[in-house]
Amino acid sequence: MKRFSALGISALMVFALGCKTQAKPQQPQVEPEITFPFTANYDITGLEVSDEFETPAKSRGQVENVTEASGLANSAANPKYLWTHEDSGADAEVILLSKKKADVVARYNIKGAQNIDWEDMAIGPGPLAGVKYLYLADIGDNDARRNNLVIYRIVEPTYNSADSGTVVEISGVEALSITYPEGPRDAEALMVDPFTKDIFIISKREDSVQLFEATYPQSWGAADTVQLRGTFPFTGITAADVSADGNRVLVKSYSAIFYWKKDREESISHLLSRQPQRAPYNPIEFQGEAICWDGNSYFTLSEKVAGIVPKLFFYQAK
């Protein structure tokens, strides 16, 4: 009887230890230490192409009456539409495009703003809770000598049928003057974090372009010096966008689209320090300078080149 009890107790102990081993909780994923500004050094020619999107892209039609489209944003107030704008020397206006047919629906002239060289736009939060704002980046500087770079911010206009085919004047613009820590440079890519309200700019012309951040709260109505956050191993960046859920980032050059996706809680700067994938870019546009998310899918748009009217291209998420 004693022997039976001892064996029983031993068996129970082995069983308990086995259960304990199986039930041992996994260690949480340790976030790697990042020193900012980071320097990324991966080989872009060997990047994996994401299989999350259908390719080639589907055309939504030609974009008539927009000559130098340089920015693109997915409208929050008008779900069937996108925003775009033209670059240097054009009117200070945002243009509403149909997602379905790519036609220009209406234009909204921004009183108090000036288009010296608008190069990108973004949609995101602002000072009023629950209100979406358009951010417009007057940051083009081909010769790297401008001292008057500006980001404009307006409450996103709401389209109604009376606006169709017209130019609507809107007011209430805010301006943020920006400078770089080491002097002027050219840039064409702007992003706004939908949760932190931090603003990101990616430069264009260096052999290894750089990421800059204007951390919230910015000095709207005054000036801010953006901070260097990192350096990428590529060049010629023309556009960028953060998804509405804050989990995905697209950064576009003339020949490629780089794609980052969060798999943990992290900041946009931390995400961009990691190696990206490539997102499909087929067909490659003649002078593609605009990109934006639409949910988990995305649009691209080119300028008009050599008389060729650009098409609005859509990459459907699988």
Image (cartoon, rainbow, N blue to C red):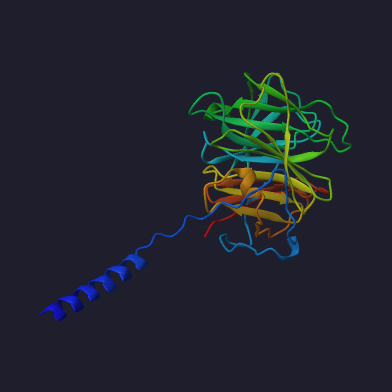
Q: Is residue 265 above or below residue 131?
A: below
Q: Is residue 109 above or below residue 46?
A: above
Image position of 135 (left or right of 45)? left
Q: Is residue 209 above or below residue 159?
A: below
Q: Is residue 315 above or below residue 83?
A: below
- Furthest toward the left, the residue is 1
Return the residue nearer the eye: 102 or 274: 274
Return the residue nearer the eye: 36 or 181: 36
What x and y, as percent, mark residue 247? 54, 47
- Furthest toward the front, the residue is 2
Return the residue nearer the eye: 142 or 307: 142
Q: Quadrant of residue 148?
A: top right
| Image quadrant where one finds the N terminus | bottom left
Can residue 146 be seen at all in this image of the molecule? yes
Can residue 101 be seen at all in this image of the molecule? no
What x and y, as percent, mark residue 156? 57, 29
Identity of the residue drawn at 87% across and 36% down: 144
Identity of the residue drawn at 13% across and 78% down: 2
What x and y, as percent, mark residue 248? 58, 49
Identity of the residue drawn at 27% across and 68% down: 16
What x and y, as percent, mark residue 251? 68, 49
Identity of the residue drawn at 56% across and 60% down: 52
- Number of marks drawn: 0
